[in-house]
Image (cartoon, rainbow, N blue to C red):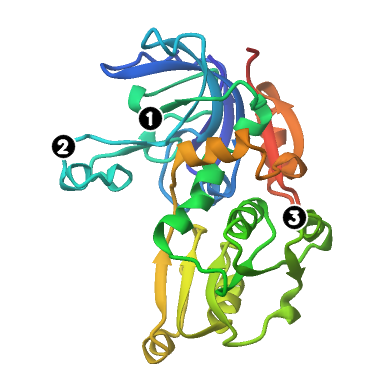
Amino acid sequence: MKGLWLENQQLKLRTDIPVPEPKLGEALVRVLRAGICNTDLELKRGYYSYAGILGHEFVGVVEQGPENLINKRVVGEINAACGHCRFCRRGQPTHCENRTVLGIVNRHGAFADYLCLPIENLHPVPDNVPTDIATFTEPLAAALEIQQQVVLCSDDRVLVVGDGKLGQLVAQTLALTGCDLLVIGRHPEKLTNLAARGIKTGLVDAVTDKAFDISVDCTGNPEGFAIARRALRPRGTLVMKSTYAGNLSLDASSLVVDEITLIGSRCGPFPAALELLAAEKVDVKPLIHSHYPLTEALAAFEEAQCRGVLKVLLEVGEV
């Protein structure tokens, strides 16, 4: 089968990869669509030492698995847990000590004709959700994870730093809480997507120091973190939604003095994300920048790395 292979920070489109064989409790999924995200870009830059097929945002069709899922469109949670470690026993499988992670840690990913995942990780896509739209389930779930970690009130002043793919989804989901929300970024054309939904937007100079209760860094760069940090009032909460390829320097003393709560945030609830997409409570269409066939995955990856580009989708198969 075909697959986009990463090794030693180099990408190669291979055509000689064996079709994976699902283990006990797993399903074989034929990939229909897959999205390139910032984590994929960071992996190429060396964020984590991974060799194999990239990709973790996908929609596919089950070809081998339980009868109720055969020929059904599905999306999949990316963490494959052991079910036995202390985190699994506590109901925290995304932190499983023995987990593999689709396209990230010891499990081949979605930029290929086929992938395998545990059956329990798979979620059927509602009939009214188009395949392109369903590809956003994983990042939308990640955006919703913030609301699993932080209690938001209508009078909370919330800042989202970053107008990229993840920042756009975080902003739309936070707006549904009714909080006093401001989103800042560097690209007026991207911020227009959010302003059209009634969300307040601005550039960096729109941020007042120590004025926000909660800030969310969706930039993945030190400058974005610094803006999110200085925007917080004492005893505020800073949520980090992005991975960093390099080290991040910060003033630890100021975190102590201002009693800042720092929260890392990644994978989130798939059922809630699918419900939002089915009910059209978030709009991901403006985030789709371009489509490429899997055979042109290298060109797709090059475009995804360009400044200002939002979501690039790989068209892998047909329903």
* Residue 137 picture quarter: top right
Q: Secondary structure at mark 3?
A: loop
As rendered, which of 53 and 171 lies closer to the eye? 171
Q: Where is mark 1, residue-wise?
A: 121
Q: Which residue corresponds to mark 3?
A: 307
Q: Nearer the viewer, residue 246 or 72?
A: 72
Q: Is residue 68 above or below residue 85?
A: above
Which quadrant would the C terminus be assigned to in this image? top right
Image coordinates of residue 185 in percent, x first then y, are 72, 66
Number of numbered discs present? 3
Q: Position of residue 17 (x, y in %)?
A: 48, 17
Could you tell whether 140 is left or right of 304 in the image? left
The CA distance from mark 2 to mark 3 is 43 Å
Of callouts 2 and 3, the N-terminal one: 2
Task: Give me the disc on residue 84.
Answer: 2
Q: Residues within 10 Å of mark 1 (few under 14, many from 20)?
A: some
Q: Earlier in the sequence, mark 1 or mark 3?
A: 1
Secondary element under disc 1, as helix, strand or loop, is helix
Q: Amino acid at mark 1?
A: Asn
In the picture as drawn, the residue positioned furthest to the bottom comes out as 257
